[in-house]
Image: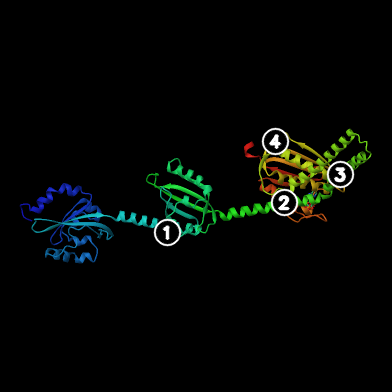
Amino acid sequence: MSSTPSRFDQINARFRGVIDAAVDGIVLIDENGVIETFNPAAERIFGYQAQEVIGRNVSTLMPEPDSSRHDGYIKRYLAGGSPRIIGIGREVVGRRRNGQLFPMELAVGELHDLEPRHFVGMVRDISQRRAMEQALAAREQELRLMFDGAPIGMFTAGLDGSFNEVNPALVRMLGYSAPDLLQMRCLDLTLEADRGALERAYRGLVSGMRSSFNRQLRWLRSDGEVVSVELHAAVAGGSMSAGFIIGQVIDHSERVRSELESREARERLAHVGRVTTLGEMASAIAHEINQPLTAISSYAQACIRLMNQGSADQQLLLETLQAIAAQALRAGDVVRRIRGFVGHRDSDRESVALNDVIASVLELAAIDAAANQAQISTELAPDLPAVLVDPVQIQQVCLNLIRNAIDEMMDLPEPSRLLHIETRLGEEGVEAVFTDVGPGVAAAMRERLFQPFQTTKVEGMGMGLSISHSIISAHGGSLRYSDAPQGGARFTITLPVALSSV
Ligand code: ADP
């Protein structure tokens, strides 16, 4: 080194502060590749102290094959060859003091008008950025796998509801090809009747009132079939203005179909049950209708006689005709009650008083009880909360319990055939308790009591209690058996209190 500072030393000294403060590593080398300046950022990046590398060839900082070839690169450039890296920033691999290789961005420039010639390398360690990029790519791949492999339909959509991306499950669910779906919006798939609900939910999202919604909708497949879906939509990307919509779609068609089928099956079964119960009561009913018919017939004959005598007493005629009308009404009443009981098919839940249901069933049961010389006493608690039930189905259950009780008491002497019906408020809801004085359910029968085709009667079907049990369960209630304290059978129906009356 000469005593007067070289131009390089002057530059180096002048920019020392800038070089030392730089965030990027700065390495100055001469035309032989020998390191002359190594700033603190370069020390941090490469793990060398400046004095360890100053005077050494810059190839120390790079792995093979660049390390061995580096002198050649400089020579070729100095000889006028086209630069491979000078003036061009690019990504290369660096080598730290501990041998670790890392990705770095390198920009090399020549310090002009210097003799000998010098080069400056600016180095940025991008290993962290790379690691983040790799983690992001891995995460992206994971999400892609989830999206593509999800068993439920998934999509992303723009703010106008048009699909941006759809997954294979959604394509399968809807029968459209992915490109076709990408031309559509959720709304286009939605059945006319459900569009209002979807639009309202959607407006809630767009206005920022809510960040997600869940809707049960019916969508139309490409083949015109309806799929019952549950759509969960949420805003992604923070705000609606910068965001998009992520949708998840679950196909409930199967469940809805099987629910419908099982409801229909239950309805059919219930209908069979009602017909069977009435069948068992047939002779009592026939008797009940026959009585007014016989009365009508004899009143009519009396009228004919009066008129044939030619001197009909107007008042007597009128009274006889009124008696005929009253008897006809009585017969009509029985027929109407039976028709109301058997003809009913659809399950219609209403909020009703259980006492009223029992009172109406007693009108039908009274015929049966009277025909079999059985007494029915009641103790109906006042002010019970309402229950949400299909009244005809509950009537059927009660009628069945009454019929069974009468059957079981037939071996007792007439005056002691007693059935007591009580209503009350229990812990789990409103209860109706049917207690008879018969022999009670035989031990062998108890476990299978509510199973179908279990009967101890010669002509029994063994369906009554099983249907009754399924009807009460479908109402969210229970039907239980216990021995009555004084012997006899006790059946307890419990029905949950209707929410509106809580
Ligand atoms: P079915 O009346 O056709 O036999 P159910 O399912 O209504 O069918 O009743 C099943 C069986 O349960 C009856 O056969 C009878 O053995 C028994 N059972 C039902 N109710 C009573 C009762 N109140 N007392 C004693 N046993 C009963």
Q: Check residue 271 in the rendering and tell me which mark sits there, or answer none.
A: 2
Q: Nearer the viewer, mark 3 or mark 2?
A: 3
Mark 4 lies on residue: 384
Q: Which is nearer the eye, 258 or 185?
A: 185
Which circle's residue, 1 or 2, is located before the other in the chain?
A: 1
Label located before the other in sequence (3 or 2):
2
Q: Earlier in the sequence, mark 2 or mark 4?
A: 2
Of 467 and 346, the residue lying toward us:
346
Pointer 1 with pointer 2, Cβ within 8 A: no
Give the crowd class for mark 1: few <14, some 14-19, many >=20 residues within 10 Å: few
How far apart, in angstroms, are the residues tagged by discs 3 and 1? 76 Å
**Left or right, residue 320 beside residue 484:** right
Which of the 4 image quadrants contains residue 437? top right
Q: Quadrant of the C terminus?
A: top right
Q: Is residue 486 visible?
A: no
Outermost front residue: 310
Between disc 4 and disc 1, the foreground one is 1
Element assignment for label 3: helix
Task: Give the side of residue 205 with respect to residue 410, left or right.
Answer: left
Can you tell me whether the CB of the residue at mark 1 lies under 8 Å from the nearest atom of ligand 1? no
